[in-house]
Amino acid sequence: MEIIKSTDLVKRYGSRLALDHLTASILSNSITGIVGRNGAGKTTLLQIIAGFTQETSGNIEVFSARPFNSLHVSANSIFIDDFLTFPNTLSLVDILEEGERFYPNWHMDLAKKLLAYFELDEQTVHNYLSKGKKSTFNAIFGLATRSALTIFDEPTTGMDASVRSDFYRALLKDYLAHPRTVLVSSHHVDEIEELLEYVLLIDQGKTKLHMDIDDLREYLIGVSGRTELLEQWVKDRDVFFRRRIGETETYLVIQNNVETKDLEKLGFRVESISSSDACVYVTNKHKGGIDDVFRDH
């Protein structure tokens, strides 16, 4: 069942177009990565889904309701981002206790165990925490709500690598035990790849790709071979990336819709492309990458 549906979603901030007729749907009880470069529109989309921001035009439904200022959406969702704040008069344990009052699926035992694991003092005031510790506490709060819709917008900012790894593992383990719809935004796909079931790739406010993570891993391939033969073979195909290798060879990235054995018969070499690199290639404006900047110089 689709828990989120958007059609031709547009959001403008003055003259800037943050979302450009974005259409997508998110299945219930799934983990979807909202990925894209900085400024692609990820946060704007998530804020609209959470009901924090009103769309300019188009349609958006969350739990079959328009999310903006919706009590139903608010009561069944949590939005965790880098700017989440709590009252300075409350300690961390006070905040957890208030969370238990509001969220019907709240799990205090999980929250306190994670607080202890990540060495967060229950009596500390949230505002006194370091950047990384704030992100860790916010992430714990989001997990403990066990909301039907749980949104993490770049949740690991400031965390150490080991803490990030532990948090994502905790998220996955709790999701498997208590399924709900989870959205995780990041511009580092490789960091969250093992969590994901689906990927929504946004570029310049538009849906660029929306697919199963396994399909994304197979979406592109790299092909290299003698330049003259390879360019002749690829002339009617879309090329996502092109680089010369020495004087006689070229490396190309293309969509994986050909048989590897057929390419190998032509003398070409074929390699797989990671999901992270696929997102980069698909959204690249320069098909030669950074080398294009130095061409003819």
Image (cartoon, rainbow, N blue to C red):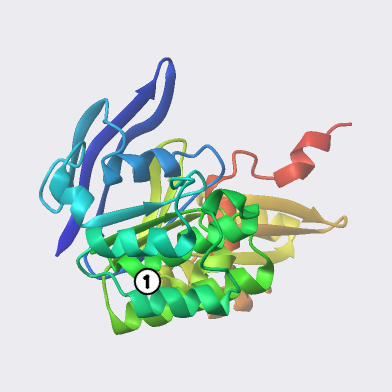
Percent across and percent down for residue 199 are 40, 61
x, y percent for residue 88: 49, 45
Question: Residue 53, located in which quarter of the rendered image?
Answer: top left
In depth, the one of 50 and 200 nearer the eye is 50
Determine the residue positioned at 31% across, 84% down: 177
The image shows residue 51, relative to residue 11, as above or below, that is below
Amino acid at pointer 1: Glu
- Most extreme residue toward the left is 64
Q: Residue at x 40, y 53 (%)?
A: 209
In the picture, measured across the screen, residue 285 lies left or right of residue 69, that is: right
Residue 23 in view here = no
On the rendered image, what quadrant is the C terminus found in?
A: top right
Residue ID for mark 1: 197
Q: Is residue 67 visible?
A: yes
Q: Quadrant of residue 98?
A: bottom left
Residue 114 on image: x %, y %:
49, 76
Is residue 11 depicted above or below 59 in this figure?
Answer: above
* Residue in the picture at 33% in, 28% down: 11
Residue at 24%, 35% in the rendered image? 8
The extreme top residue here reads 15
Looking at the picture, how far across and down is residue 173, in whole percent? 41, 82
Q: Give the secondary structure at mark 1.
A: loop
